[in-house]
Amino acid sequence: MLVKAIFGGIEAASDSAGQSPRESRTLNQVVGPPSPTFSYGGGRGGAEAAPARRITPGINLRRVLRVGSWNVLSLSDDHRLPLLSGELSRLRVDIVGLSETRRPGSGETSSGGYTYYWSGMSNGHRVRGVAIGISSKLQPSVVEVTPVDERIMRVRMKHTLGFMSLVAVYAPTEMRKTEEKEMFYAKLDSVLDQCPPRDTLIVLGDFNATTGTVRDGYELCVGPHGSGTRNTNSSLLLNFARSRRLRIAGSWYQRPELQTAGHGYSNAGGVAKEIDHILVSTRWRILQNCRVYRSAEFFGTDHRLVVATLKIHVQVQKNPRGTTMLCFILRN
């Protein structure tokens, strides 16, 4: 464990004025066909970049941030948005990654106190699709939106210690061909390669994979409360999490049976499986809790809303000279 001490205040974890060439590149240079990148306040980031605007100091990670993951089965009609926003507001969710949204193309829309950015099929078909919903109070902290395809998108946000990269995913099901699954994770790796190394990384969505209960070889990313039986999708998820030093949030907290009855349901007899996940970077000790909300309802979805509580762990100490230090705990 490494302790980072900052004298006389908080040190920004990233300096936007001094970004390296690696940090300033867009996903279009690595990932498949060109995708528009919407940049806010930091210059123009693509053919459809939004006009510059004032950026707030950012999300305060010293306060609780509630991040969710939910397969909504369909968000193709705008009339569904008010209900979704109402449920998120009722459960005090600040940011949510949505999968199987079935909205074609890419764009943004606002409803009920949330702004939704989505990425779908470029040919207009209403299948698959991902989105990220952000509470209006945090939306001014968005600095970049990068729709990749109908399975992956990224939103970068400012926080008081640097930046946060949120990646929404919708992984292929177990029935899909192995080549398609491997291509998905290869593209996901390419997306994460474009995230500046100092960004706080959060990956959330429907991975169509359980973690299993055996931790051997995966102690860093899987906690003592994993579930299900491992299969091909499980191995792909766990290897990805381990390679990126990401913690699968739900596996670290023991929850009552009412909460763990399933993040999603398989189509075989209503058997519950935990397949929707939130993966959090282990660099900062920010993961505080994770649970499932069975009370959350959204039309016909048989998936449960998963919510992780994030808050940076801060210790206030005195050095021998009497100067106050703020210590932010990081992990190796």
Image (cartoon, grey):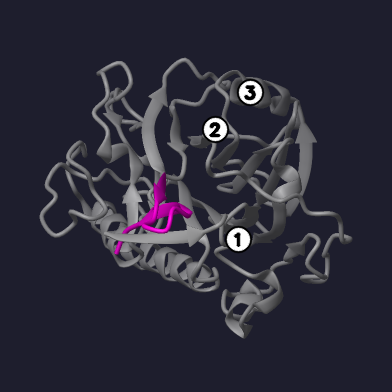
Residue closer to the observer: 252 or 99: 252
* Residue 260 % position (x, y): 29, 25
Q: Quadrant of the N terminus?
A: bottom left
* Residue 136 % position (x, y): 74, 36
SS for dot 3: helix
Q: Read off the magenta span.
A: 315-332
Residue located at (18% from left, 54% from top): 219
Residue closer to the observer: 225 or 126: 225
Using the rendered view, name the quadrant where residue 8 is placed.
bottom right
Specify the amino acid type for callout 2: Val
Residue 293 lies, with reference to residue 53, above or below; the image says above
Residue located at (39% from left, 26% from top): 292
| Cα distance in 3D space between marks 2 and 1 | 18 Å
SS for dot 2: loop
Name the residue that disc number 1 marks: 149
Q: Is residue 101 left or right of residue 124?
A: left
Specify the amino acid type for callout 1: Asp
